[in-house]
Amino acid sequence: MQPARRFDTDPSGMRAMAFPRPGAAPTARTLPIPVPGPGQLLVRLHAAGVGRWDLLERDGAFARGPSQAPPFPHVGGSEGAGVVVASGPGVTGFREGDRVYGLVAARAPRRGCYAEFTLFDADLCWPAPPRLSMDQAAVLAVDGALAWQGLHEALQARRGDALVVFGASGGAGHFVLQFAANLGLRTCAVASGADGVQLALRMGADAATDGRQRGFDHDVARFADGRAVLALLTAGGDAATRLLAALPAGSRVAWPRGVEIDLPQRAGLSASAFGPRYRGDAMHAFHAAVERGPLVPHVSRRFPLERLPQALDAVGAHHLGRIAVLTA
């Protein structure tokens, strides 16, 4: 499949939401539709995921390439889902009309998914599971891969292990619970709010407690019952420190880099940060787990593309699971 000429020359361009300068709110723009190069797919997006990493872009900490800052206007959005419309030289395994989800891992100088069209490298694009809607598929790549790698690589979880998930009702946390259930783990979810506790139980947690309430650490200690457990932390703060203090000796703890964890002054914990890998075998192993299922992303709020500023504000407030913008 070669690039369709109409996408190269359409004078009307595409709708996009772009940051006009560092630290500025995104605004509506009409930009040229990109042309796929070697190994790339042009995808007509239906939805894009909105995450906390996007707040860093909004506030001026933009994704950078090896030697240059992103050009402006800058289109953010690391992940999305849509339909293949064209491909560049050397692409195999995809056809026009395929439903896909993908990741734009390092954007500068490339544009992201807050637009009607984007380019995915073919090795960072996968068939969207038929059971999922486009907005569900759009939020898979970043948090889903982080959850899978934290569980399988950082903690090396095995069937029968006991796992505590801190931040269990958030983007990565609700994926962790589902992967853990598929693996046969016994899980205790520390969620945010009563609605977060209910979501965690629906996602397969064996026990759930509200991390905003006093005494949640006692619930965790009762779950562990004096035996070493695994713990995956997707958020930090004072509550995370209280959780760590409640874990029995011999427990193993992991959290993604970028989450600030203050380790308590005590012995007996094996604790480390891990850096998610968004390329190669790690992502293909994650996609294989998605295909095996069952895995259902929880999208709690959806905004039209033009309301991206409101979607970013919603990410910074209390919400469950993930937030998406609809681009089609």
Image (spheres, rainbow, N blue to C red):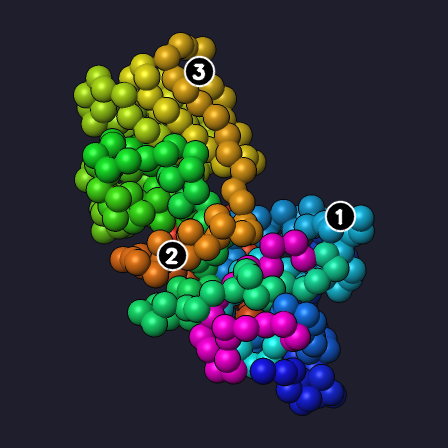
Q: Which of the marked residues, 1 or 3, is nearer the chain's N terminus?
A: 1
Assign a secondary structure to mark 2: helix
Q: Nearer the viewer, mark 3 or mark 2?
A: 2
User: Badge 2 is on which residue?
Assistant: 288
Q: Secondary structure at mark 1?
A: loop
- Please report the residue visible at 41 percent of the width from the left and 20 percent of the height from the top: 270
Q: Residues within 10 Å of mark 2 (few under 14, many from 20)?
A: few
How many residues crowd mark 1 within 10 Å: few (<14), some (14–19), many (20+)?
A: few
Residue numbers of the magenta segment: 88-107
Which numbered disc covers residue 159? none
Q: Which mark is residue 66?
A: 1
Q: Dot 3 corresponds to which residue?
A: 264
Q: Amino acid at mark 1?
A: Pro
Under mark 2, the amino acid is Ala
Q: Is residue 83 magenta?
A: no
Which quarter of the figure is the N terminus placed in? bottom right
Report whether residue 250 is seen.
yes
- Residue 107 x, y percent position in the rendering: 67, 57
Q: Is residue 90 left or right of residue 328?
A: right
Mark 1–mark 3 contact, CB under 8 Å? no
Distance (Cα) linking label 1 and label 3: 37 Å
